[in-house]
Image (spheres, rainbow, N blue to C red):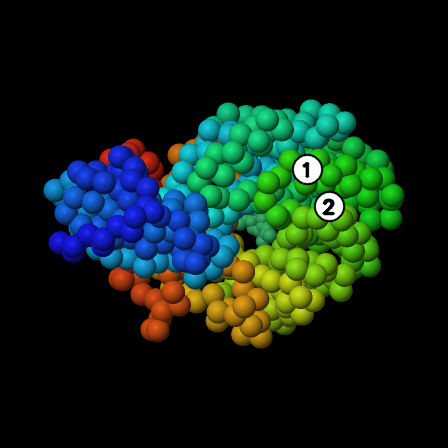
Amino acid sequence: MLPLVPAPRHLTRVADAPGAPVAGDVVVELDPAIGAECYELTTAADAVLVRAGDDAGMLRARATLAQLALAADDGRYPAVRIVDGPRFAYRGFMLDVARHFHPPRTICEILDLMAELKLNHLHLHLSDDQGWRLAIDGRPELTGIGASTQCQGGAGPDGGGYLTREDYRRIQDHAASLAITVVPEIDVPGHTNAVLVSYPELAVDGVTPVPYEGAEVGFSQLDAANEETYRFWTEVVSQLAADTDGPYLHLGGDEALEMTERDFLTFLERAFAIVAATGKTPVAWHEAGRSDAIPAGAVGQYWNFVRPRTASEDRFGIDHADCAGGFPRQGGRLILSPSDAVYLDHREAEGLPGVAWAAGPTPLRASYEWEPSAVLPDVPDDAILGVEAALWTEYLGTREELLELMLPRLAAVAELAWSPAPHTPRRIEDIAPRLAELGRDWQRRGLPFTRSTEVDW
Ligand code: TNX
C-alpha cells in the first residue's frame, strides 16, 4: 500500500466514498491548474485523495474509483497513484431516437453508462425520415403525425413517440450532473420525410408524402428554393438553441442524395448561418464540408471508413477525406466516427444481430484497433476535436437491443478516446482483461452485452 499523500490544510473532507467501499476519508481538492476533466488520485490503506481540475475531473476520478472497486477483492481499493486526463476533449456517443423512439429513462440509463466510461457528449439524433422526436412550440404536426411512426424491425412497441421540452430539460439536467453535454441533431435537408408528412408545403412539389417506416436513406429533401423552409428551420433552431445548455447544434447535412448540388449548397449556406446566428456552434456530417460557407469554428462529423474512400471507390463518387477537409480548411474541427469502427449498429460477427453495410461485421477488435490521427492524414492533430461512437436504430426497438450492441464496443471506443496516443499500435489483447472485469460487473447488474470472442469473459 502507498502512504497517503499528506493533505494540505485547505482540503475539504467528506465522509462518504463516492460510490465505492473505503473505510476512511475521501479527501477532495479542486485546483484549476490541474486542467479540464483531469484528476490525480491517490489511494492508501484507509483513505483516498482526489485532486481535480474541475467538477468534471472529480466525476472522472469517481469513475476510476468505481473501476478500482471492481478490481478490489477485499472491499478496499488497491494502493495506486493515478495522474490522468483525456486525450480528446470530445468523447461522444450518438443515439438515434428517430428510427425507433427510446424514452427518457433509457436515455438517462445510457448517460449513466457513458459517465462510467468517462464519455462526455451525448448526441441525440432527434429527427429522420421515420419520425420527429422533439416537441416544437407552434409546430404541432411534427409531434402529431410526424412522431407517430418509426422504423419497422426490432422488438418493442409499434408507433413512435417524442420528447417534450420538459423531457429534454430533465435529460440535460441528468447529463449535467455527470458532466456530459447533450448535442441535439435535427437532420436537414435530407432525412426529412417525417417533416414533409407534417408540413407538405416544405416539399419540392408540395405533395404530401406517405409516412415512411422502412430503412432506406437518401430520398427526402426540404425545398431549398422555398422561403417557408427557412422560416421552419429558424423556428426549430431558435427553440432548440434556447433550450440547449451545451455549445453545439447538429444540423445533419448527410445523404440528401436526390438533391441537386446547387440546392444542397444553397440550403446549407442558409442553414449554417441560421444556427450560427443563435450563438451555437454548428455541427454537421462531413458531406456538408462541400459547402464553402461553413461558419468559423463549426464542427464536421466524419462517418466514412477508417481508410477514407476516394471518389473512384465511392458509390456516389464522393472523395470523403476531401469533403471532411472542408471543415478544417475553413477554420473548423472534426469529430471522427468511422463507420467500419464505431457504428455500433453493425453486428460484431455473422449470425449476431445488427447491420453490416460498412465493411461487413464490426468486431470488437475493429472498434479498438484504429488510430484517430491516422484517418485523415491531411488534417492536423489539433483539428481533431474527438471521437464519437454511433448507434443507429433502424432495427433496435428496446433498451435490451441497444445495450447488446453498445457493449462492450462502447467501452473500447471510450478508452481509445480517453487514453494517450499509444507508441505502438493498439492491440485488443491489451484491453481484453479490463473488458472482462467490466463484463463481470455488467453481468451482475443484468445488463445485456455481446460476448465478443476476443475477450475471455
Ligand atoms: C448511415 S452515415 C447513416 C444513417 C443510417 C446508418 C445505418 C450517416 C451519417 N447516416 O442514416 O442510419 O448509416 O448504419
Q: On screen, 393 above or below 49?
A: above
Regarding residue 444, the answer to whether it shows in the image is yes
Local packing at callout 1 (Cα closer than 10 Å; few below 14, some 14-19, many 20+) is few
Quadrant location of the N terminus?
A: bottom left
The amino acid on which the numbered mark 2 sits, given as a three-letter code, is: Thr
Q: Under tag 2, what secondary structure? A: loop
Q: Under tag 1, what secondary structure? A: helix
Horizontally, is 350 left or right of 65 in the view? right
Please give the name of the residue rendered at 64% of the width and 63% of the height, measured from the top-left corner: 332
Disc with the residue nearer the chain's start (1 vs 2): 1
Q: Nearer the viewer, residue 267 or 79?
A: 79
Q: Position of residue 355 (x, y in %)?
A: 48, 48
Is label 1 in contact with label 2 (beta carbons under 8 Å)?
yes
Q: Position of residue 146 (x, y in %)?
A: 68, 30
Q: On screen, 143 above or below 347?
A: above
Q: Which residue is mark 1?
A: 242
Q: Position of residue 81 (x, y in %)?
A: 24, 57
Q: Position of residue 129 (x, y in %)?
A: 66, 39
Please give the name of the residue rendered at 62% of the width and 48% of the height, measured from the top-left corner: 248
Please give the name of the residue rendered at 16% of the width and 44% of the height, measured from the top-left corner: 46
Regarding residue 350, the answer to whether it shows in the image is no
Q: Which residue is mark 2?
A: 278
